[in-house]
Amino acid sequence: MFRAGRVLGSYALAVVVLVLLLLLTYAGTLAQTDASIHDVQRRYFDSYLVVIELPPGIPLPVPGANLLLSLLFVNLFVGGMLRLRRDRRHAGILVIHLGIAWMLGGSLVEFLYAEKGFLPLAEGESADRYYSYTEWEVAILEPVVDGRERAHIIPERRFLDLGSSESTRFHVEGLPFTLTLSGFVPNCEPMQSARGPALRALPLNPESASRNVAGISVSVEGAAPKESVLESMLWGSAGSPPWVFTVQGRDYGVVLRKKQYPLPYRVELRSVEADHHPGTNMASRYASDVTRYEGNTAHDVHISMNSPMRQQGFTFYQSGYQPASAMTGGRAISTFSVSRNPTDRVPLYSCIVIALGLVGHFLTKLFAHARTEAKRRERSADALG
Amino acid sequence: MRWVSVIVAVLVFGQVARAEETSVPAFTAPTLDAASRIPVQDQGRVKPLSTYADFTLLNIHHRRTFALTEDRKLSGIEWFLRTALFPDATANERVFRVEDSDVLDEIGLGTIKRKKRDLYSYAELSRGRARLVEKYLRAVEVDSRKQTRDQKRLVTLAHKLFLYENVRNVFVFASSSLRLIAPENEADGLRADWSSIGDLASRGTVPSKSGTELMARWNEVYAARADRTAMEQTMQSLLVASRERAESSGAYGDIELEVHYHSFDAFTKALILFLLSFVLVAASWLWPRNVWIVRALVALLVTAAALVVYGIVVRCILRGRPPVSTLYETILFVTGTVVISALVIEWINRRRVGLFAAATLGAFGLFLAARYEAIDGKDTMPQLLAVLDTNFWLATHVTCITIGYAAGLLAAAIAHVYVLGKAFRFRRDDREFYRGVARMVYGTLAFSLVFSVVGTILGGVWANESWGRFWGWDPKENGALMIVLSQLAIIHARLGGYLKGFGLSMAAIGSAIVIGFSWWGVNLLGVGLHAYGFTEGLQRALDTFYLVEITVLVFGASVWGAERMAARARKS
């Protein structure tokens, strides 16, 4: 047990893990010339194991970043317990490692719990939810009173791996039908086939995974024995209307869309401003004026590059804009990146701690070295003299 | 109606004058000096006409001067004035540098091809203009990263041609878009749109009094172009009128300072001093006990460092930015940091290794800066993207990262002294010397690690403030992380006793390869948020750097291996 502890806390393990992380990072960087950052991140950096192909096609499993970072955290902790000298001369080292541990811990929390997405708004438009960049959901829309509807969500993990001949059935309590999903396609476009409307699979977008538009086949079987099976295809393009079907005299809808995250308030875009460097097409700055409605109160906020809006754990960042045009209905559009991250400020605080430790330790060593060198020169001068 | 007569006079006079162009007189120094200070708005910023002229010539000709004859070299502003005022007479001057003459086949000019890399005139190239424009318009519809090599060459040639025509047609109204006319009495003339001479002449409204006078001054310059003495007076009058107009909108800015920056050319002066220093370093090896050589060396290096710092400070003032906001500025800042750090190391250790590193890397860095400027061929003070419009993060994250690069490369340079010294048996029995060098390598690496770690994390904090994510595994972020990981691995290997002097030095050289990849290589991948500054010549230079460092590593390893075997053989 003690020997295992010595190995886990050893310099050798630290060096091996650091070198493997270095090689993994290099491989993941080169991989981005052919694949999107999202795909590379999932494969190399959000995984415990990566299978890379060595020529001529020999698969080689190597540790993924999650495994290596976990090992590094353990090594940091165990090594600190075993080896770290708790005296003034080594205070800097202790501070550095505590800061790194804090940062790694914060990264883990972010990885597990952060929710990130985007929200495009046209001038005058408002919203109380934002959208995932890459995750999908199927929403069954049930009409309730006053023309409103209740959405029953089927998360992506329930249908992401469905091939063309695979299906899975869903029944929502209280709804008079069973829904079957099959043949999820991560990127596709609609087309007409001999059998009617169909979805044509497309290669995944190598530049940005968020540009992939998924599709899935859906069928509905009514609760009553004589009701026929209704079939359709859902295409996840923004603005695609739900597929509406009737069961027992009521209209229901089902739609494939980007996963939605609710906000605790409504945000309305009042106006977008954009300046360009004179005589160029390069934007020098762009910013949005929004109003945030929380209950009965309204707050006007200015959001610009490098100056986000933070409220109730959600942060809105000015991400992009489109000028008003015929395509946008004559209104400018502002796109916000939205993030909910419980450890939003941990990197900044841990950086300060690490910096203090590094600078303190470095200066201690530097002054000691300078004194040693000065003494060496004195001894040389004495010897010559 | 006065303005109408001015316009008509210019139009008519211009046409008549073109027919009478014969020889082009040399302009006097006062004429060139006055012309240099005329303000122009280009690529989103107001700059002196000399800056515009210099970079236009650099782009077209790949040199800052144009050799008209063996004895006569033209500066950028002189070339500009000749081309603008005597377009027909200068049309046969071979100013276009074409890197690969095969591009001429694409536009039907295969018959005029000479050497692979040669100079051509506007008169020669304009015969293929129609085909060039047609192919250019097709090529620019393709994403620049997906363009074929032929398309890239065509686009490059077309851009050169358009730039030249912008100069050539300054006095051909409605043909040049050069923005020489400042707005009048605007609240912020630096941010407002300027006009070209053609804009002012062709506008439907009546120009103001100052606009009319400015047009008259341009007209006078054109009329006086064949008379050197008259040119001096008219150019001075034009400068006064242009300056007054720009100042009315607060748009004259730092024109004088920028003219001084380019004419003083601190970096070229520093490069000369670094080269002289290198000679003195060699002399100090031959006469190691001569203190005067060392004192002269220190004086030269300190002066050179001061010039580099001066140049960087002036750039900060001109741009209103922290010292590093473009790839070009990273080279200058890295050079300055390396030299100052090497001098500090020398002050502490006094082994002359710091002096050697300062001279070598100072010269190399400024030479690289000059080559980059020539290859890029663009103004080195461009406007920034909106996301970079933040002095706080430029001052913290970017500066820290660049200091990290500099110190890491310095550690590697000192490590070369260790590895090559051991290999060539320099001071073979002086173990204290090599222990001292190893300590320098380790200490400099630790210094680099401080700034690399802090800079990398600050980059993540900045990304979080801008885009809502601390880390996105973007290639540039990965590059910075790789530097941190390589340096952490080295330091922990040293602490664990796995690396001693020789191994530490070899690892530091390896770390320099990682820094090269992070600093330049990721930009050349053309991926991610930092994919800018893509330049073919840089790829070759970077590959050469990798090859040299790998050669040193292989050489060092083989010498070390041979010595170990010899030692074992002696023991047995």
Image: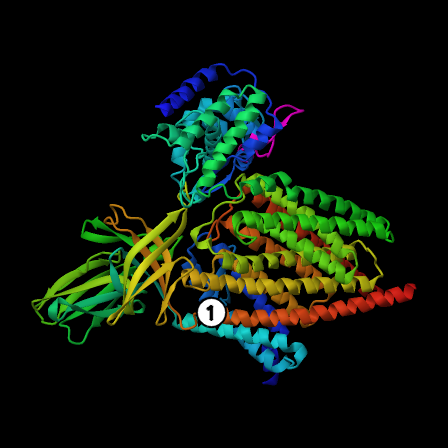
Kindly identify the residue that appears in the image at 75 percent across and 47 percent down. Answer: B277
Check the image and report above or below for A284 versus B212. below
Q: Position of residue B355 (x, y in %)?
A: 75, 53
Residue closest to the eye, B7 or B356: B7
Left or right: A315 in relation to A65: left
Q: Chain of mark 1?
A: A
Does the magenta portion include A358?
Answer: no
Secondary element under disc 1, as helix, strand or loop, is loop
Quadrant in which residue A223 is drawn: bottom left
Q: Nearer the viewer, residue A321 or B203?
A: B203
| Residue under the image location 43 percent in, 24 percent down | B172
In this rendered view, identify the residue nearer to me: A366 or B282: A366
Residue indicated by mark 1: A48
Q: Is residue A51 visible?
A: no
Looking at the image, residue B245 sits to the left or right of residue B421; the answer is left
Quadrant where the N terminus of chain A lies? bottom right
Instruction: Name the outermost residue toward the bottom.
Output: A1
Residue closest to the eye, B560 or B471: B471
* Rendered location of residue B459, percent (x, y): 50, 61
User: Residue at left 61%, top 57%?
Assistant: B405
Q: Dividing the picture into quarters, in which one does residue A368 lie? A: bottom right
When the figure is inspected, residue A52 is found, relative to residue B111, above or below; the finding is: below
Residue B309, can we see it? Answer: yes
Chain part drawn in magenta:
B57-77
Q: Position of residue B539 (x, y in %)?
A: 56, 45
Name the image quarter holding residue A76. Answer: bottom right
